[in-house]
Image (cartoon, rainbow, N blue to C red):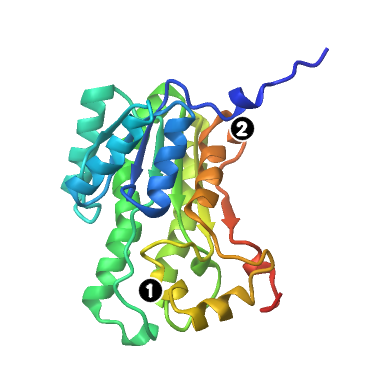
Amino acid sequence: MSTIIEASELFSLAGKVALVTGSSRGIGRAIAETMASAGARVVVSSRKADACEAAAAAIRDAGREAMAVPCNVSRQEDINRLADTVLKAWGRIDVLVLNAAVNPYMGPLLEIEDSAWNKTLEANVGSVLHAARRIMPGMAERRDGAVIIVSSIAGLKGTTALGAYAVSKAADMQMARNLAVEYGQHNVRVNCIAPGLVRTDMARALWDDPERLSRALGSYPIGRIGEPADIAGAALFLASPAGSFVTGQTIVVDGGTTISAGYS
């Protein structure tokens, strides 16, 4: 006789601790709020302490549990301090969402200055490695954990303006594949989410101009750009029991633009 599994159980994070970087606004904040609503204790983290506290307070005001721990992911010592703070307070990190990223340069790839190149790679790729190195062994000891890297569809195709950012996001996808292979034996899953254009402050230059937005929408079969909540739903799936047999994958959440011929 089959047993019906309740949807509330499939998508529950009750008893889990979820750490989300870059979560004081935009996609990261939506992910933090969604995971809190699914029962997780959530760590809100970004560079500015006041912004972190405001986001964590909003979660607490909704009757959920959250703490704010500021961190600049470009600094390895900050990542270590972040992990130490969470582990001291709550004893574990079950879900690690690596969302923090930068894009300091737009333009031809060969014209990027070394400083901007290095900043992009360290913040978007190096920080992923540093955080994984610090946190994943604890997951392996408990034989339970989920790591989610927020990448981008920029890592799946060529671009005339976002070359360095695209390279870093492609590297994140490979990071997920490698770590998934290495840690699968410990029941730790690692996946990427590759959003399309989402209405966030970071992507404002790509959607706030009506002409540019109109051109973009021409390649989105679903007829709109993304909202942060669209990405949060995918993150909850990957973090929850519903995603327990998914690892090493890049889940594209883009309204269909990467499968479009360039028009809808």
Q: Quadrant of the N terminus?
A: top right
Whether residue 38 can be seen here: yes
Amino acid on which disc 2 is placed: Ala
Residue 255 in picture, x, y percent from top left: 63, 62
Residue at the (40%, 65%) spot, across then down: 168
Residue at the (24%, 37%) spot, across then down: 68
In-front residue for pair 217/77: 217
Residue 54 in picture, x, y percent from top left: 25, 42
Q: Which mark is residue 164?
A: 1
Q: Which mark is residue 78?
A: none
In-front residue for pair 69/77: 69
Mark 1 or mark 2, earlier in chain: 1
On the image, which quarter does residue 33 sit in?
Answer: top left
18 vs 78, left or right, is right
260 vs 74, left or right, is right
Residue for badge 2:
242
Residue at the (48%, 50%) spot, across then down: 176
Residue 167 in picture, x, y percent from top left: 43, 69
- Neighbour class for label 1 at 10 Å: few (<14), some, many (≥20)? many
Vertical side of 80 occupied by 40: above or below: above
Vertical side of 16 occupied by 100: above or below: below
